[in-house]
Image: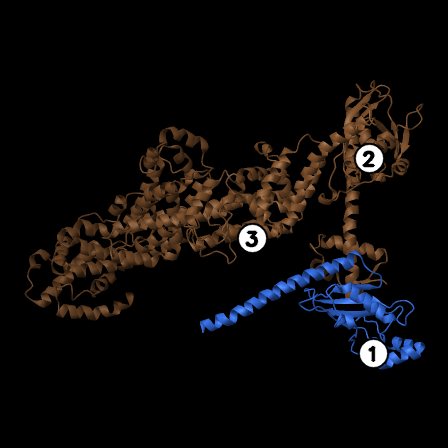
Amino acid sequence: MDYNMEDTQNPVEAQKVAQRNDTQSVTKRLQAELMQLMLSPSPGISAFPDADGNLLAWTATITGPTETPYEGLTLKLSFKFPNDYPYSPPTVLFKTPIYHPNVDFSGRICLDILKDKWSAVYNVSSVLLSLQSLLGEPNNASPLNAQAAELWDSNQEEFKRHVLARHQDLDDE
Amino acid sequence: MLSTVPLNAGRRRVFGSVFSPSPAHSLKSDNPVASFESTDSTSTVKADSQSNSFATIGGSTDSASADAEILDQARVAAAEFLSVPNLGFEPLYAHRDTDGSELLKEWNRLAPPSKESAEALEYLMRTSPWTLFEWYGNDIRKHFLINFRSGLTKLLASPEKEDLLRTIVACLQLARRIYLAPVLHFLLPLTPHQGGYLAQLQRAFHTVVSYSLPWREISPLLASELTRDAVVILGIDTLDETFDAEMSEDEMEVERTYSVSYKDWKEETPEAREHMMAEGEDHRVTIARDRLLAFLNGLQLVGLGADKAQKVFAEVMNILMGDFIHAAYAGEWEAPSSVPQHLGQWIENVYARLAVQVLSVIHSEIESGTMDVSFGDVEKWRTVGTARLGMLRVSELFDVVVDWPASSGAVEDLRHFVTQTRPRAYVTHWFSLNLQQRLLHPGASTVEILQVYISVIRAFHLLDPNGVLLDRIARPIRRYLRDRDDTVKVIVSGLLADPAAVEGPVTSDTLVELASELTRLNQHSMQSKNSEIDFDDMNWLPDPVDAAPDYRKSKSADVIDSLVSLFDSKETFVKEMQTLLADRLIQKRRHYDQETTVLELLKVRFGDSALQACEVMLKDLTDSRRLDHAVRNDQIVSGNLTAEDTQLHAKILSRFFWPEFQDQEFKVPDEITAIQESYASCFEKRKDSRKLMWHNALGQVTVELEFENHSFVDEVTTWQATVIYAFQDSPPDSPATKSIPELAEQLQMTPPLVRSACLFWVSKRVLHEVTRDTFEVIEILEDEHAPDSDSDSEAGEADAAAAAEAAAAAAAKESAEAAAMEKMNVHWQFIVGMLTNQGPMALARIIMMLKIAVPGGFPFSDEELREFLGGMVTKGKLEIVNGGNYKIVH
């Protein structure tokens, strides 16, 4: 029994240690990213950790780029960082309801750098910038929202109407 | 007892018929009482009718009825002789102070019995002595209850408690004599079993006494009575400071040999110490002792002694032990301490002696044969004494620590106390409480707290070398110190202080002690710095049982290590070190030996890498001295410089390694700029790819000013020099006049700084303020009015100096505020990010988030942040929405 305990205990222990080390390095990296975001803010994007205190969940805000249907809109996103970040991409979702060819109705995003093209050199700020540009130039080849993709190509006015109809400000939740 | 009376008539008949002289059969007999009942009145009934001579019939016991007859007659006669007149309590009270013989005479207790009575007594003693005494015992009870009880109760209830018990005891003693005198004088000589009969009577007396006087009321009286004399005997009264000083001084010569005072004792030689308390008792003490013992003797005689009195005595002695220890040893902290020895002797020679004497008087009746005080008891008292001493020291511990190292004796005493777990817990508990109350509050300065902490480390290291107690005590202090902003600063400045100053008066704002500690400790420190598990350590001991889980054994009382380890990382410490070092190195000084030494010592402690920046800073200075020399030589060789020119010496600092300076930027005079440029070009020639950036605000200038009738030479700061230089380029005919806005514009200096500089010059009597913010050079110093208004001008000068100082402080504050604002701007970004993404938040939440998110923590207080956010609200960048939440304005 005692042996048994020892056998089971050690791997768990080791795993825990490894996990803690991971968490530490992730935290460190995220802290650095936050500092960078704060010291050299890019216009139109912003992000900050959630209040739970472990830095693994953030909320980001991007404003819609000018001369796009999203101009003047504020869009919120949620970031969930895995324990092996930055070696795996964060899970990014739109929290604000958005009408976009590459975003489905539950906010999931189809963006290559958040999937197979992810690389450790990307960071929160680069992801946000990519998303911002995705708003202006959707990738209609692989749409998650086929109607939006179609409308984008055929009727920009109607598209914009859909965008505004779907949009809700989340600020005063 | 009285309820049995109705039975008596019957019993009497029974006894009359079956009379037996054996006392065993008649033990319970209450006959005599019944016979005596008729003698209620004060006039005793004369048994005239029974005037037969007992002597003639006494011996004949031929017929039972005749015997009974004779016995009855004998009893009546004896009763007549023994009966006590019912005179009430008053005569007793009146005669309480006499020896009682008069009263006895008055009450007819000493008169020998008449012939018949004597015969009757003899007869009774011969035939049924037990009955006689039984009967008389009852008689005593009855009489006592009738005559004395109410009087004594009244006496006991009287408000005057002083000597009350003595009065009562005196009365009771007298009563006892009244009752027993005839027995002692006339009855007992008739029998060989004196002790037994007497004891029987005494018991009867004692019973009625304790029945009449409730112990509940007697015991406090007895306690105060005991205390009064015991205080004198134990010597506690002489220890009081209030004790008449002159008297003790007079007595000192005569009575020197006897004293329980610890101070006196300490001054004696070891041989004399032995005898000091054992011999040559003080006169007063002897009197008190005799008085007390006599009193207790009386107490014992009247039946108020024994077990119950012993209990009271024990309580009193218990209290007095504490009192003595308090009076004798409070504040006696010198090392080496011999308090335990003194206490031991006192307990043995004074305390135990009194206990033995008292207990031998008020011994319990049952086991009077055994020794009342055993050697084990004395040992126990010693233990109790040590514990009491420990409690005293614990209560004093905070002051002891504050007085360290003058008070190390007290800690030695305490060592005897903290040998077990419970006292240890007691010590730490109380000391922590004390600390909380007296030290860890906003009223105490950080220097004070650190000072006490250092003393605590040293004192507790002596107290408990394992460091467990220290570990427990130090936690709250350390936690508190971590919260203080200026802790690091104080420590670092303490380390950098001049150890030579330790000898001087203690300064309140620096911990000079640390500097000396640093040098001292280095001599024997580092060797024990090895790893935690040392298998070759033959002196290894397990951690003490009461150690905290994360307790770490520290081999030495390393004060600096404790202070430095206050902070999680060395970085905070090193950063502060850098700032302070920078300030010191910037100053114009010949050498920096002190700094170098400190740095070397710290390097041993922290390792080279941690202090690399500091080392570079020091190296910069030596390098720049050499470079400065070289550059000057170059300049002279190239002919750019002549000896008359203004000399410029530079300190070349490697920007990367120096902390940022709070700079007040301004334009230096063109001449200086020119020199700076030539200097820089020479430098750049020597050092390729390096560029000089001038910090104009840092530095000293030697200024020589020539006026029409006075001059000025001194070393001033660069900005002060720049301001006075600006007065030079005005038209030469009239005294130069400048206003502050003008100067600020010209020199690109902030107005407060300009004002500060001008006021400085006013204090030097170089400028004077013509109108508000306009200054004029004093070309002609009016000396003539100086003599008559000397004090006036001096006062004015002092005022100006003070004003200059205030202005400089204001300028410094402004630049500091600007720097703080700069820092706050970074945090502003965080706040913007936070509020943008997380929605409106309350202040508390913002602070919490900032503490989590900002690397290195959030250095501002809640108030500062509230103010800052308030400012942002005014600026329109924030708004306050429902419930005081801050919201960003888009």
> Pointer 3: what residue?
B475
Any part of residue B347 in sight: yes
Q: Chain of mark 1?
A: A
**The residue tagged with tag 3: helix, strand or loop?**
helix
Relative to B303, residue A143 above or below: below
Q: Nearer the viewer, mark 1 or mark 3?
A: 1
Q: Nearer the viewer, residue B92 or B616?
A: B616
Q: Chain of mark 3?
A: B
Is residue B220 shown left or right of residue A162?
left
| Callout in the foreground (1, 2) | 2
Amino acid type indicated by mark 2: Ser
Question: Do marks 3 and 2 share a chain?
Answer: yes
Count of picture labels: 3
Does residue B319 show up?
no
Give B356 or B9, whichever is nearer the viewer: B356
* Chain represented in blue: A
Specify the amino acid type for callout 3. Arg
- Circle 2 crowding by C-alpha within 10 Å: few under 14, some 14–19, many from 20: some
Q: Which residue is mark 1?
A: A143
Viewer-side residue, B323 vs B69? B323
Query: Looking at the image, do the residues carrying marks 1 and 2 touch, with CB atoms under 8 Å apart?
Result: no
Rendered-image quadrant of the N terminus of chain A: bottom left
**Residue tagged by mark 2?**
B681
Q: CA distance from mark 1 to mark 3?
A: 61 Å
Q: Secondary structure at mark 1?
A: loop
Q: Which chain is brown?
A: B
Q: x%, y% of residue B802?
A: 77, 33
The residue positioned farthest toward the bottom in the image shown: A147
* Chain under numbered label 2: B
Which amino acid, mark 1? Answer: Pro
> Which colouring convention does the figure follow?
by chain
Q: Earlier in the sequence, mark 3 or mark 2?
A: 3
